[in-house]
């Protein structure tokens, strides 16, 4: 009999607090999470006002020494600045209060500093709030980096509900895109003998299903919408912790999204007032097309996205048809080692046009 040699490490958040006015619980949470009393609060200008200020007040009242650092974008430079700042002080724990960029920068800095961090999302625009993954911007797009999972998550649905609804819809689309990511993972297991975890896959699919089942209830200015979305994002983050990588939540649809980022601001439709497409919005559109290529129920994915109010066409995404095709053709170049439905050589232009047309994206 073959000897058993397998081993695996899984790191999960220890405590997750989600719901109405949970910000008030920040001091109790810190008391349980760390022995020391030196906290580094990481915010951006908006989140400082939104909840950073209140958190500083609560922590100071509870005798914490509070250091504060503002970050602007998710770049290597910002991560290094934060690390240097923290090294000069004796920081026991970091709190990332904000959206994607703040959480990602804090997550990476905490990982490098070997310090725990608490994720305090102020919006729910992608599933990184509870995951061990962080994405950083650089000149030619974005890169996904491995870090550790937050030690705790403190998600105040009252605050998250105040963020523009478009962000929440994008976050939900990001979770729905787990469906095509898992299809890719299964394919890679069958064709490339890639290590596969059925538990991680089921968790990722469950998160997507949770959002799709409640698509009717995800509406602007309703706090329960934030509750549903955050719960699904946490399950999605846990699926990545179980897998030990981003496979259950990131496949060809994410490569398509990263390629759109890589193609740069030129992807925008001219004369449109809309802001730059969000990560989750791009992944949602990617998922419609990748599920189609897998022969899956892509209409169900499209209908759920539509119900939530996430874009389902190039027009709604504010990206030109030409760029959609270009991103589809080049998407496989993003992560050549990650096998997906796009294969090793990617789609031809003809095939890319066909899938985008068949699914109504262009
Ligand atoms: Zn994503």
Image (cartoon, rainbow, N blue to C red):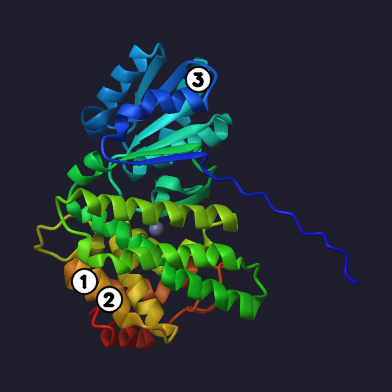
For label 2, the residue is 302
Q: Residue furthest right?
A: 1
Q: Position of residue 235 (x, y in %)?
A: 45, 55
Q: Nearer the viewer, mark 3 or mark 1?
A: 1
- Choose between 2 and 215: the one closer to the eye: 215
- Give how far apart the Cα atoms at labels 1 and 2 are: 6 Å
Q: Position of residue 78 (x, y in %)?
A: 41, 34
N-terminal of the pair, mark 2 or mark 3, is 3
- Choose between 136 and 311: the one closer to the eye: 311
- The residue at 25%/64% (across/down) is 267
| Count of numbered circles on the image | 3
Q: Position of residue 87 (x, y in %)?
A: 52, 20
Pointers 2 and 3 in contact (C-beta within 8 Å): no
For label 3, the residue is 91
Q: Secondary structure at mark 2?
A: helix
* Rendered image quadrant of residue 192: bottom right
Height in image: 188 above or below 309? below
For label 1, the residue is 306
Crowding around mark 2 (Cα neighbors within 10 Å: few <14, some 14 to 19, many 20+) is many
- The residue at 51%/67% (across/down) is 202
- Give how far apart the Cα atoms at labels 2 and 3 are: 46 Å
Pointers 1 and 2 in contact (C-beta within 8 Å): yes
Crowding around mark 1 (Cα neighbors within 10 Å: few <14, some 14 to 19, many 20+) is some
């Amino acid at each position: 009999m073959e000897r058993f040699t397998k081993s695996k490490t899984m790191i999960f958040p220890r405590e997750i607090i989600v719901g109405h006015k949970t910000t008030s619980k920040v001091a109790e949470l810190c008391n349980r999470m760390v022995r020391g009393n030196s906290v580094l609060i990481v915010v951006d200008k908006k989140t400082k006002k939104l909840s950073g200020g209140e958190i500083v007040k609560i922590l100071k009242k509870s005798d914490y020494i509070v250091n504060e650092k503002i970050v602007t974008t998710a770049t290597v430079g910002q991560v290094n600045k934060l690390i240097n700042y923290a090294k000069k002080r004796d920081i026991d724990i970091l709190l990332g209060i904000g959206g994607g960029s703040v959480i990602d920068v804090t997550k990476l800095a905490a990982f490098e500093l070997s310090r725990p961090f608490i994720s305090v999302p102020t919006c729910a625009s992608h599933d990184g709030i509870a995951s061990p993954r962080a994405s950083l911007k650089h000149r030619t797009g974005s890169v996904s980096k491995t870090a550790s999972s937050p030690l705790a998550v403190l998600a105040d649905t009252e605050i998250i509900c105040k963020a523009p609804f478009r962000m929440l819809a994008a976050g939900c689309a990001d979770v729905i895109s787990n469906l095509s990511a898992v299809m890719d993972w299964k394919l890679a297991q069958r064709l490339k003998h890639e290590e596969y975890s059925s538990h991680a896959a089921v968790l990722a699919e469950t998160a997507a299903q949770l959002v799709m089942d409640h698509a009717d209830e995800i509406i602007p200015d309703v706090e329960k919408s934030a509750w549903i979305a955050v719960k699904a994002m946490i399950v999605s983050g846990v699926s990545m912790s179980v897998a030990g990588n981003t496979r259950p939540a990131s496949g060809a649809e994410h490569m398509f999204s990263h390629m759109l980022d890589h193609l740069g601001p030129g992807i925008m439709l001219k004369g449109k007032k809309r802001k730059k497409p969000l990560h989750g919005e791009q992944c949602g559109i990617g998922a419609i097309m990748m599920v189609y290529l897998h022969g899956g129920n892509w209409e169900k994915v499209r209908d759920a996205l539509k119900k939530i109010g996430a874009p389902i066409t190039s027009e709604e995404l504010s990206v030109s048809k030409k760029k959609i095709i270009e991103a589809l053709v080049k998407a496989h170049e993003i992560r050549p080692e990650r096998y997906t439905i796009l294969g090793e050589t990617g789609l031809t232009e003809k095939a890319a046009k066909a899938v985008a047309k068949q699914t109504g994206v262009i």
